[in-house]
Image: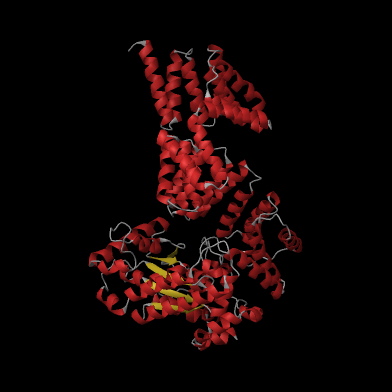
Amino acid sequence: MTALSEKDATLGAAVQALRANRPLQAEEICRDYLVLNPGSAQHLRLLGHALLKQNRLAEAEEKIRFALSLLPDMPLLYEDLGSVLAMQERYEEAVPQFEQAIRLEPQLPMAHKKLGQALAALGRGEDADEAYREYLDLDPDKGVVASGINHLKAGRKVEAIDSFRAALKKNPDNVDAMRFLATAYWQDKENLDDTEALLRRATQIAPDYIAACMLLGTVLLERNKFAEAVRVFRDATAQAPQQGEVWAGLGNALARASEPHESARAFARAIELEPGSAGAQMGYAHTLKTLGDQPAALDAYRAAIRAKPDFGEVYWSMANLKVFRFEDDEISAMEKQVGREDLSESAAIHFRFALGKAHEDKGDFDRAWHYYHTGNQRQRMQVKHDPLEMEERQRRIMDVFNAEFIAGNADCGCDAPDPIFIVGLPRSGSTLVEQILASHSQVEGTAELPILGKIASSMGRYRSDRVEYPEIVKTFRKKDWRAYGEQYMEESRHYRSTDKPYFTDKLPNNFPHVGLAQLILPHAKIINARRHPLDSCLGAYKQLFAKGQHFTYDIQDLSEYYQQYHKVMTHWHAVLPGKVLDVHYEDTVTRLEWQVRRLLEHCGLPFEEQCLRFHETDRPVKTASSEQVRQPIYRSALGKWRHYETHLDIWREDLAGIIDELPDSVKAADA
C-alpha cells in the first residue's frame, strides 16, 4: 500500500468511525497514523473531532491549534478552533476564529451559524442576526426550516408542517426538518408513530443531535417505552456529558422505569452540573420522595423554589407529601404569587391546590375549599373529559363480558397465577392495600403498570374491518386468550426486580378491564379498593394529578364517574362471583388484622405478621400516598368529608343509594 493510499484509507476509516458515533475508534486510528506521520494536519483535525465528541476539550484545542500551525490557511480548522472555544464558553476568543474562517472561505454556512451563536452569547444581537442571515442565504434548506420554526412559534401549525415537509421533500436527510416536524406533531400529541419515526431517523443520521435525542426520549416515555427511553438518554449523556439537562432527562426516564436509585444518581449529576436548574431539583426531589427520604426531598424542593420562586408545581409537590405542613412564610409566599396577574395558568392551578392543603392543615376548611374549588375549575378548562363517551365505552364492555361469554371462555387464558390486580378509584386506599401485600415475603410490589390497558387498546388496531375492543374479543379463539395472557406476563417482567412468585399490579383505572384480566389470566387475583363515596370523591377533588384522571376536576363529573364505577364493579361481582374482593379502607383502618387475614386468604397466601407492620417495609412508592403508607395505621383520614359538608350537596344526593348499601362497619367508622 502506498503512503498516499494509506493516508486516504485511514482518513476514510476515521470519518466512518465518527459518523458511527465511535470516537474512541476514530481517535485510535488517527493516533496510530500520526505516530509515523506527525505532520498530517487532516489526521490532527479528525483527532480533534474525536476528542470533542468525548468532551476532552482542552486536548481537542491543542490538536486543532497544532494542525493550524501546519496549515494556517485552512478555513475549516479556524471553524473547528472557534467551535472548541465556544464549547468552553470562551466566546470572545471564538468570534475571531469564525470570522477568519469566513474571510478565507465566505461560503461556509456552518461558520456563519456558529458565529451567530457566539455573538448572541455575547449579547451582540444585531451582529448575530446578520450572521444568521448569511447562514440562511448560504443554505436554502435551512431557510425553509427557519421559516417553519417561525410559523410554529407564531401558532401557525399547518404552515409550519408544510414548511418542514417541503424541506424533507427536497432533502430527505434534513435532520432539522425531521426534528421540528416531530415537534409540531408532538405539541398536540398527534401522529405519535410518525413523531417517533422522524426522531429515530434523525438520531440515526446524527447520533450527536442532542435536541433530537432529548425529544425522542420524551416521546418514548409518553408511549410507555421506558427501557428504550433510558437507552436514548444514556446515549445522550455519553454524547454530552457536561449538559445537566441531559442527565435530568436520564433521571426522569429511570424514575419512570422504576429504577429510583439510579434516577437519584442521574439527577444528582444534573444538579452538580447545573445547581440552578429548578426542574432538575424538582425531579431529584420526586425521586427522593419515592425512596422515602422526605427530609432530602424537602431540601431539593426548596432549592427548586429558590431557583424559581413562581414554580407552583414545586409547592404542590411539597403539599403532595400529605404528611408535610407548610411554614407560615411559605403560605404567605404562595398567597402573594396567586395575586400576580402575570402568573402562568399552570402555576396558578398548582398554587391553588397547594394553598388548599395549607389552609386545611390550619383548620380553615372554607378557605381550603375556596382554593381547591377554584383550582379544579381552572384545571377542568385545561383537560378533556366526555362523561357520555366514558359511559358508552363501559356499557359496551359490560355488554360483551356478560356471564354467558365469560363462562364460555373460562380457563382458556395463561395459567400464570403471579398477578394481583388492585383496582378502584384514586385516593381510595389502593396504595395501602398494595403496601400490605408487598410486605409479604412472597409478593413483589411493582407500580401502576400500563400493560392491561395497552393490551386492550391494541386489539384490532390493524384489522381492516375496524372492529376494536371490546367487541373484537367475540372473535377470539381459545388460544388467543392465552396469547394475550402470555403477552401480559412477558411485558410485566420489565417492571420486576425479584423472583418472588407473586406481584401487584395496582392501577385503579383498570376496573373496567376486570373481565379481560380474568379471561387472559384466570388464576390472577383481583382486589377492589373501596372507600366511603364522599371521602373517595373529596380525596380525588383535592388531588392535582400529574396526568389523566380528568374526571376529578368537576363536582358533577366526579359524581357521575363514581356512579359508573359502582355500576361496573356491581356487574363484575354478578358475572364473576367470588373473583373480586372488596377491601374497604374503613375496615382496614379499624380492623387491620381481620382485613389483612381476609386479604391474604383471597390471594392464597399464608398469614405473615410483617403485613401488619407494612409501614416498616422499605420499597419505592411513587403515588401520592407514598408518605402515608410509611406510617402505622391512623384514623384521622376517616370521615374527612364532614369538614366540607356544606359544599357537598351534589355528592350526598347523587350517591345516597350507594352510601345506604355500605356495610355497617364502614358506616360506623365514618360516623
Q: Is residue 308 above or below residue 350?
A: above
Q: Quadrant of the N terminus?
A: top left
Residue 484 position by quadrant: bottom left
Residue 587, position in %: x, y? 52, 81
Is 586 or 606 nearer to us in this picture?
586
Is 217 or 420 nearer to us in this picture?
217
Is 156 or 478 nearer to us in this picture?
156
Residue 364 position by quadrant: bottom right
Q: What residue sits 38% from the left and 23% below the top?
A: 13
In the image, 623: left or right of 578? right
Q: Quadrant of the C terminus?
A: bottom right
- How many labels, in total? 0
Q: According to the image, what is the colour scheme of the structure?
A: secondary structure
Residue 406 position by quadrant: bottom left
Would you say residue 241 is visible in this rendering?
A: yes
In the image, 360: left or right of 557? right
Residue 69, position in %: x, y? 56, 13
Q: Is residue 427 above or below residue 10?
A: below
Residue 389, position in %: x, y? 44, 69
Is 163 or 577 nearer to us in this picture?
163
Would you say residue 415 is visible in this rendering?
A: no
Q: Is residue 5 above or below residue 281?
A: above
Residue 573, position in %: x, y? 38, 80
